[in-house]
Image (spheres, rainbow, N blue to C red):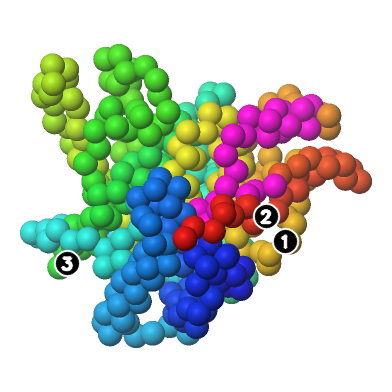
Amino acid sequence: MGNYIIEDIIRFTGDAKSRAFWEKAVRILGEPIVAEEFGELKYQVHTKNIREPKKYLTALLKKRLKAKEVEKAKQHPSSAPDKLKTYFEENQLALFSSLTLPHPAGQAEKKVMVVPYGKETIPWATFMSSNFFTLSTNKAKSDVIQAKFRTMDGAVTVIPMLRGRIKPNSKELGIPTVEHARILAAIEHIWAQQGSAYHSYIDAPSVCYCYVSIRELARLLGLTSFGGSNLAQLTSKVWELKYMGYYLDLASLGFKHTMNRGFSLLHSVELAEGVKHGQMETVLKVEFSTPLSAQLINRKVVSRPKEIAYIQSELWFLLRLYLEPRLISLEDGAVYSQSLTGIIEDLALPTAGWHKRRDARRHVFQKALKSIKNKTTTDGREIIVAIEKGLTDWLLTARLEPAALPEKVS
């Protein structure tokens, strides 16, 4: 992927003389960060906000490199490759280290990340796999699934995860749906736009926060109706993310002295309302939960384009969450394939009659694929997805293909 990014940068900027600098940036910052800034450059060129692409990209990467030096001076360097550090935890013990117990916190210090996320992306925590969310057709208020987490050492950890309850036998709070996932994605985009801010405590985990205008949130979700009842319903959906819980049975992994964990995706939501320009304006202060905040601050994310919040097909949204980290971790041009039955199991889809019929499975997945309007990653590559015939079942195949570059900008 590194050579791919460098060659694309050279073609786009026309600056072959700076190859050594581009290679240094990839080597020090890692491919995902360079790809993120390259995507920011292409967006700014597309919107005609800059005239000298090479100078703009150089400035972005120099800022990142300087911040990296500051960060490195504060921490012990790790020998893990940046690409793997971005997507995976080192091992099983590290995988759940972000699920720390909250402590009573003293006075908070407002901070922003030394290297904030790109403002045109959604930093999606890798810990939140596709089976954290369900389809709206799922009538269950809670369930237990076998969640899979892949770590950097190649191991796949399978752990029972209770969705919709904060602990076994507690009140059913409802399973977060794809609609909740789209709302969370839009809120994470707003957080990135506002500079990736967080509250830092001396004796407690840091908590990321942002201010969310309900009308702006509706716009990011592609909603065209801004009536009072619709905005009130959207506000309620944000509040639900605070209460809808998950419970991980960590003791089943066999670690000594391991405690199970219950958590939600949002820590707190506060509301303020007032009349602005003759209409009611609702603003929420949203704090992410400590597990989600830890992932964001430690850059354990897959950067996704902001357009994923627009996705209307619930099945394609879950497929997008499922496929993208798998494709990014493959070599260029490599094809990922999985049987439709296997994907149904991996996504923990609610039981339906079409699951058992081979051609019905193909029909449902093909319908989801036909609804796709945007299949590009943040670094401009296109996700090519198809349904192909296998020996015993239809297969979903996917690969990444470089998107066509615009003509050279002088």
Is mark 2 in CB contact (under 8 Å) with mark 1? yes
- Can you tell which mark lies on residue 333? 1
Question: Residue sitting at 31 percent across and 61 percent down?
Answer: 116
Question: Residue sitting at 58 percent across and 30 percent down?
Answer: 313
Q: Is residue 317 left or right of residue 42?
A: right
Q: Earlier in the sequence, mark 1 or mark 3?
A: 3
- Tag nearer the camera, 3 or 2: 2
Q: How far apart are marks 1 and 3 (CA)?
A: 47 Å
- Residue closest to the eye, 1 or 264: 1
Mark 3 belongs to which amino acid? Asp
* Image spot of residue 240 (x, y percent): 34, 32
Which residue is farthest right? Answer: 391
Q: Distance between the residues labelled 3 and 2?
A: 46 Å
Q: Earlier in the sequence, mark 2 or mark 1?
A: 1
* Image spot of residue 39 (x, y percent): 47, 56
Instruction: From the image, tell me which residue sits under label 2.
Output: 401
Is mark 1 in CB contact (under 8 Å) with mark 3? no
Quarter assignment of residue 269: top left
Label 1 residue SS: loop
Mark 2 belongs to which amino acid? Glu
- Tag nearer the camera, 1 or 3: 1
- Placement of 139 over or under 59, stated as above or below: above
